[in-house]
Image (cartoon, helix red, strand yellow):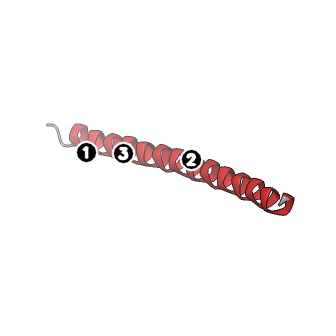
Amino acid sequence: MSEHTGEGRADSGATREEKARRKAMLIRAGIYIFATHLFAGFVLLLFALGGRK
């Protein structure tokens, strides 16, 4: 019985680690998406200002 409980704890730790990695990946992806949109907006602003007469 104690072996089964130990496996449960190991699975719980692995699950917790997987959730932490997934959360970190989502945060990183959100930052990348935000930065890309910010850069694209800046480029569009440059084109808009450069196209003025």
- Which dot marks residue 37? 3
User: Residue 4, located in which quarter of the rendered image?
Assistant: bottom right
Q: Are marks 1 and 2 in contact (CB under 8 Å)?
A: no
Q: Say which amino acid is labelled 2.
A: Lys
- Taking depth in this image into account, of 19 and 46 the one nearest to the observer is 19
Q: Say which amino acid is labelled 3.
A: His
Q: Secondary structure at mark 2?
A: helix
- Which dot marks residue 23? 2
- Taking depth in this image into account, of 15 and 33 the one nearest to the observer is 15
Residue 40 position in % (x across, y down) = 34, 47
Disc 3 or 1, which lies upstream in sequence? 3
Residue at the spot 57% in from the left edge and 53% down from the top edge:
22
Residue 34 position in % (x across, y down) = 42, 42
Q: Secondary structure at mark 3?
A: helix
Q: Say which amino acid is labelled 1.
A: Phe
Disc 1 or 2, which lies upstream in sequence? 2
Q: Which of the two discs, 3 and 1, sits closer to the camera? A: 3
Q: Which residue is the site of mark 1? A: 47
- Taking depth in this image into account, of 11 and 21 the one nearest to the observer is 11
Residue at the spot 38% in from the left edge and 40% down from the top edge:
38
Structural crowding at the residue carrying mark 3, measured as other residues with C-alpha within 10 Å and reported as few (<14), some (14–19) or many (≥20): few
User: Residue 53, located in which quarter of the rendered image?
Assistant: top left
